[in-house]
Amino acid sequence: MPAPYSYDLRSKALAAVKRGEKKIQVSRFFKISRNTLDLWLKKERETGDYQASP
């Protein structure tokens, strides 16, 4: 099973979206899927954090 993305990568990607960068540009820059980025944003909205599930 692959390891989850690091908390640092998640932080940088979400910060870029919050600065106004387009999601597709952020996902390409960090080499993550757009769906992954959307899931992180949803998790942050719902729980207040975007840390990987154990």
Image (cartoon, rainbow, N blue to C red):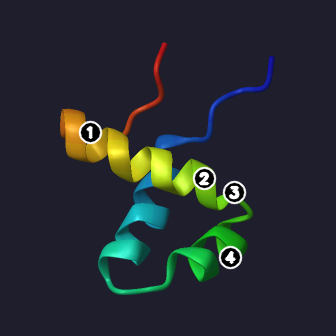
Please give left or right for residue 52 compared with residue 24 in the image: left
Q: Quadrant of the N terminus?
A: top right
Percent coordinates x, y for residue 49 in the rendering: 26, 39
Q: Residue at x 23, y 46 (%)?
A: 45
Per the rendering, the mark at residue 49 is 1
Name the kind of residue labelled 4 in the image.
Phe
Task: Tell which tag, 3 or 1, sits nearer the viewer.
Answer: 3
The first of marks 4 and 1 along the sequence is: 4
In the image, residue 23 sits, relative to residue 7, either above or below, namely below
**Element marked by disc 1:** loop
Percent coordinates x, y for residue 32 in the rendering: 69, 57
CA distance for labels 3 and 4: 10 Å
Q: Which residue is mark 2?
A: 35
Per the rendering, the mark at residue 29 is 4
In the image, residue 53 sits, relative to residue 14, either above or below, namely above
The crowd level at tag 1 (other Cα within 10 Å; few <14, some 14-19, many 20+) is: few
- Proximity of marks 2 and 4: CB atoms separated by less than 8 Å: no
Please give left or right for residue 4 compared with residue 11 in the image: right
Q: Which residue is mark 3?
A: 33
Quick one: 28 or 34, which is closer to the camera? Answer: 34
